[in-house]
């Protein structure tokens, strides 16, 4: 299946920018590059400026990363930088292919960089058997580290990172552009798919969603790591999903014991009342036991 390309409408500059902001003279063009089901619907985003292209996240599989590199080449502008939201392979695996033979900054927070480097070998051992030749033999890690709320100037725009600590992954962040009502939120919210829960920080994830919702303007567009972009209502949906997840798991496994097949089916049915999609539904069973242990250890 070919990687799909979705071009999104341009954004309007925010009327109340941050202090000492960079206000674009024209809103950047944002393009979603969506992997197919075989690539677990992982998104990458191209932000096109007059001077070049900035990439946010880089997909999972070899074929998706090659399609992403081809799309960047088709734009006829240089790749100015790669910004990473978090340390799961479906968001950084393709970096080496996309940046091959290019001198490009790959930017992440120190926490995200640490997670990538610490977990890469284990992730390969776990997931490569499933993806086979589609798993990149070489992965590229961040080569520029930024601190929380630090801006990176690329293509005349100030891209600002916001670290939130453990949430969906062991270290999550999101990126904004000064003067533009857009947030590239990685996997802090899923849109139209079931959620990855295996890292089992659901209580912290709920707190991160509160922080995200408080920080964003009401009219912001969220660009998620999986699924279609949408408004800030995506945050409320993810919150309801996680709250239902925790309630059901605490009922099904109050001691934190592994869920049997019947309990997993009950859990999935409950979550589908919040998110009806079958996309990525295998993730629920994959991570249910980890969340059961998390809640049993700290049920608050």
Image (cartoon, rainbow, N blue to C red):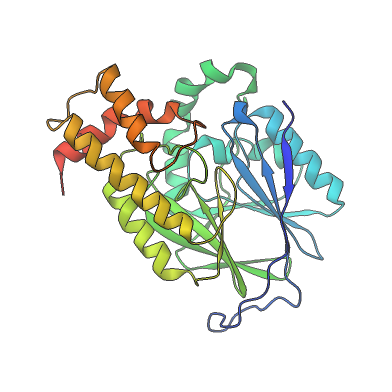
In the rendered image, the quadrant that contains the N terminus is top right
Tell me residue 284's x, y (percent).
38, 30
Residue visible at 52% across and 32% down?
279
Tell me residue 256's x, y (percent).
17, 30
Tell me residue 93's x, y (percent).
59, 35
Query: Seen in the image, is 202 located left or right of residue 254?
Result: right
Residue visible at 15% across and 44% down?
299
Q: Is residue 117 above or below residue 210?
A: above
Residue visible at 30% across and 40% down?
245
Considering every residue shown, the one lying at the far front of the view is 273
Q: Is residue 166 visible?
A: no
Q: Is residue 248 above or below residue 22?
A: above
Tell me residue 285's x, y (percent).
36, 26
Q: Quadrant of residue 17?
A: bottom right
Q: Is residue 220 above or below residue 104?
A: below
Query: Seen in the image, is 260 located left or right of residue 58?
Result: left
Q: Quadrant of residue 175?
A: bottom right
Q: Is residue 143 above or below residue 98?
A: below
Residue closer to the observer: 149 or 177: 177
Residue closer to the observer: 294 or 163: 294
Q: Quadrant of residue 283?
A: top left
């Amino acid at each position: 299946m070919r990687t799909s390309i979705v071009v999104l409408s341009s954004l309007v500059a925010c009327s109340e920018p941050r202090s000492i902001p960079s206000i674009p003279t024209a809103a950047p063009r944002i393009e979603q590059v969506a992997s197919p089901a075989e690539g677990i619907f992982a998104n990458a985003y191209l932000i096109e400026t007059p001077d070049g292209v900035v990439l946010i996240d880089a997909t999972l599989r070899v074929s998706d990363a090659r399609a992403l590199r081809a799309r960047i080449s088709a734009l006829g502008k240089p790749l100015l930088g790669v910004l990473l939201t978090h340390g799961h392979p479906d968001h950084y695996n393709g970096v080496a292919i996309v940046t091959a033979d290019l001198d490009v900054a790959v930017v992440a927070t120190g926490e995200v960089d640490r997670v990538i480097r610490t977990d890469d070998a284990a992730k390969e051992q776990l997931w490569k058997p499933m993806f086979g030749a589609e798993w990149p033999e070489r992965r590229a890690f961040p080569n520029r580290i930024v601190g929380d709320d630090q801006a990176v100037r690329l293509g005349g725009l100030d891209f600002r990172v916001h670290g939130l600590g453990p949430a969906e992954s062991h270290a999550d962040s999101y990126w904004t552009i000064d003067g533009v009502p857009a947030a590239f939120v990685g996997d802090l919210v899923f849109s139209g798919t079931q959620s990855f829960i295996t890292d089992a920080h659901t209580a912290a994830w709920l707190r991160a969603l509160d922080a995200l919702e408080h920080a964003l303007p009401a009219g912001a567009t969220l660009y998620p790591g999986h699924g279609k972009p949408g408004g800030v209502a995506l945050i409320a949906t993810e919150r309801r999903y996680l709250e239902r997840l925790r309630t059901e798991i605490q009922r099904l496994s109050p001691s934190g014991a592994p869920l049997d097949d019947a309990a997993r089916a009950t859990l999935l049915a409950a979550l589908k009342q919040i998110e009806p999609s079958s996309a990525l539904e295998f993730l629920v069973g994959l991570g249910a036991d980890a969340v059961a242990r998390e809640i049993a250890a700290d049920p608050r």
